Image: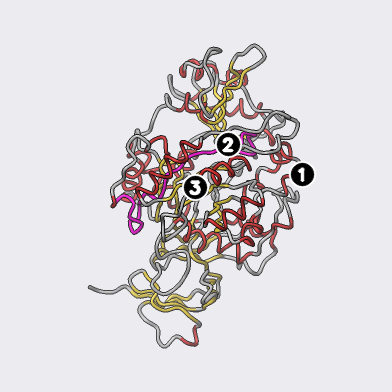
Amino acid sequence: MVQSVQTFINGKIFTSNPEQPHASAMIVRDGRISWIGEQPALKRIEGNCIDLKGQRVLPGFIDAHLHPLWLANASTQIACTPPIVNSIADLIVEIQTVYQLSRNEQWIEGWGFDEGKLLEKRTPTRWDLDQAAPDLPVFISRTCTHIAVVNSKALELAGITKETPDPPGGEIDRDSTGEPTGILRENAKELATRIMPVKSLEENAASLAELGSFLLSHGITAITDLSSRTGPTDYLNLYQTAVKKGLKQRTVLYYMWEDLKEQPHLKPDQVNCKNQIHIGGIKLFSDGSVSGKTAWVYTPFLGEAENYGIQTTSKEELTAAVEAAEQNQIQLVVHAMGGQAIDLILKTLDTKKNWLSDGPSLRIEHAAMPTTQAIKRAAEKGIAFVTQAIFMFAEIESYHNNLGEERTKQTYPIKSMLDAGVKVALSSDAPATAWADPANPFVGIKSAVTRQAYNGADTGQEQRIDVATAILLYTKAAQEITRIPEVGKLAVNHHADFIVLEKDIFDMDLDKIDTVSVSKTYMGGELVFEKHR
């Protein structure tokens, strides 16, 4: 067999490897790094010689919390975000435009609205949407994805009336007469989504493959899907088909507990981390979102003395899910933003011993408002926090409206987590944030190192981390938490997954980090993306 060998020289390589943080050259043999170090120590050029021309090189990014299929499909929906949509009136115009081109019985979908950014400073209602599309169903998802607004036609098709009770873990907003307003919170969204049309496996697989190419342009070489389902299309089959259509990223799937609880046994090959596509965990929700005022908090949301958010799971569900995760030797992954939601997980599973040896057994997603004691206990138990600094950056209006300025500064205490010894990864949760390019890692990195929102608002200077640490949380730390083998750092015997930057992220103003772009992305030493000039 003929070996593929490349020698990369003249680079400014940040390896994310604490044992060898920096290098300027490396040899890649059959997709893996066989040597890495400083160029003067390079004995000879092997194979093709590629000059990195003094540019900054980083390991490929790992997005530890992502929703790729949602993100792929969002490109075909109405983007309800600035600069296109700045008011409910703008939203109505955008829906009307689609309505005029729509066929009968076709659903109109949109994503990304944030009432804090809308001129009216309120959530749209069914009656707003009815003005644009009176006889076609409309489904508009809020930026956090935990809340949706539907029009009257959609309510009719879903069978939601004044008499419809709130589902467990969900709320149907109602007006003073008890009439549904079209706003569906948490599990109530399922009343509508379960009747919406479903794309074919082939259509979704093609969308994922196309998205994969886009993510490579951001330097993202490994991804996760935190909303994986068994039906109507099984996501394992879906992503395997996407690979045949060109998806290159190493991918970990986290299946929703509600899909697995009736038949929780998985086959060994399905959970094999060495496979490009594999199942890594079981996912469930403990609460909602801060920006949507459904996170389960200890202190009520600003101006709403009785609103502590929504508890969306129970001790019984957590206990059953953790038993299934242990049985299958995969992670238990729980969404929890508010302090009460985080503590429910910690208290329920406090006596549970870790069952995995190659990474954390339990992940808490987002961890927006952990108490000091919760941070300490997570460190002691080896529980990982997968968090998103981009939320503070992009959704500052909602955070200030819902929490106030000082309480906002206390959210996502990343430095405190790290100082306590908690395993932490940065991620995007794309498309679940109000930003035009929500998957861009450099936006989240900028937020973490500046602790300033896009509008300059202070989001907590005491919780700033440095650039190197932020990169580690998107590479090495993300690998340790997702358990994808031999990635996350540039070291001997690891996959040669790396990116070349147009500007050096270590040699620029911190407030310009979100302007950094990737010029080239390599996977296994092969060029898989190059920016056209």
Highlighted range, magenta: 269-295
- Secondary structure found at label 3: loop
Q: Is residue 128 left or right of residue 138?
A: right
**Image location (x, y in percent) of residue 117:** 69, 36
Q: Which part of the image, by quadrant, shows the N terminus?
A: bottom left
**Image location (x, y in percent) of residue 462:** 73, 58
- Inter-mark Cα distance, 3 to 2: 16 Å
Q: Which numbered dot is residue 405?
A: 1
Mark 1 vs mark 3: in front: 1
Mark 2 vs mark 1: in front: 2
- Inter-mark Cα distance, 2 to 1: 20 Å
Using the image as rendered, state which of residue 3 and residue 411 is in the foreground. 411
Mark with earlier residue (2, 1): 2
Using the image as rendered, state which of residue 502 and residue 522 is in the foreground. 522
- Inter-mark Cα distance, 1 to 3: 28 Å
In this picture, is 306 found above or below 17? above
Q: Which residue is mark 2?
A: 288
Q: Amino acid at mark 3?
A: Leu
